[in-house]
Amino acid sequence: MTRQAVDSLRATSDPRLRDLLTALVRHLHAFARETRLTEAEWERAIGFLTATGQACTDTRQEFILLSDVLGLSMLVEALHGHRAPGATESTVLGPFHQTASPVRELGAGIDLVGDGEPCVISGRVRSTDGTPLPGAVVDVWQADANGFYDVQRPDVQPPGNGRGLFTADAEGRFRFRTCVPSSYPIPVDGPVGTLLRAAGRHPYRPAHIHFIAKADGHIPVTTHVFVAGDAFLDSDAVFAVKDSLVQDFAPTDDPSLARAFGVPNPFRHASFDLVLERA
Ligand code: BEZ
Ligand code: FE
């Protein structure tokens, strides 16, 4: 049976596609043999995958979520996320980067609702040899203080809340105001939630801000910055934490600095560089 199914793929003209399909058939057949998969279980699996597809909309990607909670997204990332020494490590994109971030001035706020703990994020985009990268583009997105992205709660959050597209200054610096992100559960009202409950797993991600940094002549990085001290750093539902990405969001009580940044005092301040590898 396996031989016939594999042989049926021999005429696939794209060699990479042929390899992928062949390996998929071999591994699926091995899975069914190893587990002695029953027809009822197979039907249930088809029902689960069908529901996963049906849960997808323009603003929800249940298949990415499934890949994330099974650790597949991080495995693929680890296989190909090459990193020169000193470059910022990458991590998962996640399912909430579907809308374009609004272009914002350096120093602007991305928290349009303003109900969280005020926070300033600043740093430099530079090359691994230390050269600053003026004009680098920094795309940022995060959940609000209640743990929801704008696309999840369009009735409560204006579009673009928690998002910004910034261009680094002549010294490669970036800066923006926001609220301290909170840990949040990934969406559990669909098939992925059913799977997590069946496995007795919690759905939480440690607090983080997403970044994509791009600069001419450099390899872009898709990453997060995690808030040090978060209770879920050791049990991220999507396995995406890397130690180098955990940053202190330092409590800061400095009225003149707060005035300069345009935030209420006291506030939290995270400062780090986004370091890109030459292409
Ligand atoms: C996120 O951080 O936005 C995310 C990543 C993976 C799954 C769900 C959410
Ligand atoms: Fe996130």
Image (cartoon, rainbow, N blue to C red):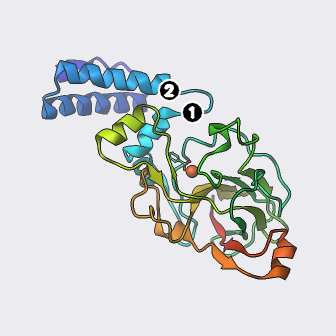
Label 1 element class: loop
Q: Residue at x 58, y 51 (%)?
A: 147
Mark 1 touches mark 2? (CB < 8 Å): yes
First of labels 1, 2 by sequence position: 2
Per the image, the residue denoted by label 1 is: 60
Q: Is residue 13 visible?
A: no
| Residue at point 14%, 35% (across, down) | 34
Q: Which image quarter: residue 263? A: bottom right
Q: CA distance from mark 1 to mark 2?
A: 7 Å
Query: How far across and down, in percent of the image, does residue 46 sit?
Result: 33, 21
Can residue 254 be seen here? The reply is: yes
Crowding at label 1, few (<14), some or many (≥20) Cα neighbours within 10 Å?
some
Quadrant where the C terminus is found in the figure: bottom right
Q: Which residue is mark 2?
A: 55
Q: Residue at x 50, y 26 (%)?
A: 55
Residue 221 sits in quarter: bottom right
Type of amino acid under label 2: Ala
The answer as to whether callout 2 falls within 8 Å of ligand 1 is no
Q: Is residue 44 above or below residue 60?
A: above
